[in-house]
Amino acid sequence: MVKGNALPFLWVRGLVAAATTWKALLLALALNAALALVVTAPLVSRLHDVLDRRPAADGLAKGWDVVLGAHLLRSEPGLLGDPARLDALEQGTLSLSEGPRLSGPVAGLLAAGLLHAALSALLAGGFAGRFAADRERGSLAAFLADVARLGLPSLLIGALGLAAILGAYFLFVELPREATLSPDLRWDWERTGLSLLRLLAFLGTTGAVRAVLAQSRAALGLAKTANPFLALASGLGFVLGRPVKALLLEVSFGVTALLPLSLWLVFAPSWSGGDVRLLALLVAGQQAVVLLLIVARTALLGAATSWMRGAREAARPAPAKIES
């Protein structure tokens, strides 16, 4: 049982478990695409209003041009939102309290991120139920029933996790910001080292929180009752008993998710307009990458469920032998 719960075995089990729910994965991909269309619609409409009456539209229609784009943003400073806050966001100096005050398409992206997180949390309840089931893992009807049964508890667990991540951001990024910029630090390497320590502390805490969320949703699927607080307590206790392995499991699937995205960013061709077939291939490639990201994040939940179930079975006392 110990060998079966080794990290490579859990990684493979998670991917296999995710593959069995391929219908639900395609549903998640379709919902993600629909959300993306809704989010980008205001920006597309705004760009049409601005560019349809400008000569620069002909140049930008052939692809993004740095010079033309700079002239456009200079002449329309509010195109993407408040320029001052966008500059602070780009430089990494935007405070956490200023985030909700973003406007324009960037604010839309922030709202879309929250909607996507909520949708992912609801669907995670369905995946948790299917991974804990002994049969009909690929049934879309059973998946939707699990979403209805476990979606809201999973959403509550996700909300608590988001609050913990925001708290970690405030603790490790916001509070030490002034110390990093202090004139008492005379050398650049001191500021760089302190910034890296802040970043590593935040990323480590975020990884630990995500590991607890995965195990909590696994406990939610395996439990007989849909109590999110009991599931969160079980997930937290499970991770505290195996902190290194739980964090490595989260990191392994994080790397699995980032690998296809990194390859796409490096090798994907750019579209300069005109070639509809290339555009269709690019859209198909983008959706394939998004699907792989969804598979990787879903596989983490599958691996967590398999690991927790195996640990519970190993801890269960063996039945006593009946002597004749």
Image (cartoon, rainbow, N blue to C red):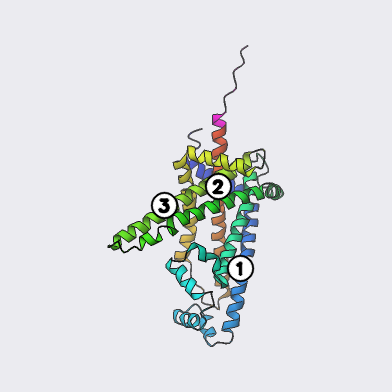
Tell me, for residue 201, which label it has, or none. 3
Q: What kind of element bears circle 3?
A: helix
> Is residue 232 visible from the viewing direction of this image?
yes
Where does label 2 land, which residue? 213
Tell me if label 1 and label 3 are in contact, CB under 8 Å. no
Q: Nearer the viewer, residue 83 or 13?
A: 83
Residue name at image x 62 percent, y 72 percent: 41
Q: CA distance from mark 1 to mark 3?
A: 32 Å
The quadrant in which residue 46 appears is bottom right
Q: Position of residue 23 (x, y in %)?
A: 65, 53
Specify which label sits upstream in the sequence, 2 or 3: 3
Specify which label sits upstream in the sequence, 2 or 1: 1
For the residue marked with disc 2, what is the amino acid? Answer: Leu
Horizontal side of 193 relative to 19 (left or right) equals left
**Foreground tag (2 vs 3):** 3
Residue name at image x 30 percent, y 63 percent: 188
Horizontal side of 237 relative to 197 (left or right) equals right
Q: Is residue 322 magenta?
A: yes
Q: CA distance from mark 2 to mark 3?
A: 18 Å
Q: Position of residue 310 (x, y in %)?
A: 55, 35
Residue name at image x 27 percent, y 62 percent: 187
> Is residue 15 visible from the viewing direction of this image?
no
Q: Quadrant of the C terminus?
A: top right
Q: Is residue 264 above or below residue 85?
A: above
Start-end of magenta stretch: 313-324
For the residue marked with disc 3, what is the amino acid? Answer: Ala
Specify which label sits upstream in the sequence, 1 or 3: 1
For the residue marked with disc 1, what is the amino acid? Answer: Val
The quadrant in which residue 279 appears is bottom right
Where does label 1 land, which residue? 39
Disc 1 crowd, CA 10 A, few/some/many (<14, 14-19, 20+): some
The quadrant in which residue 51 appears is bottom right
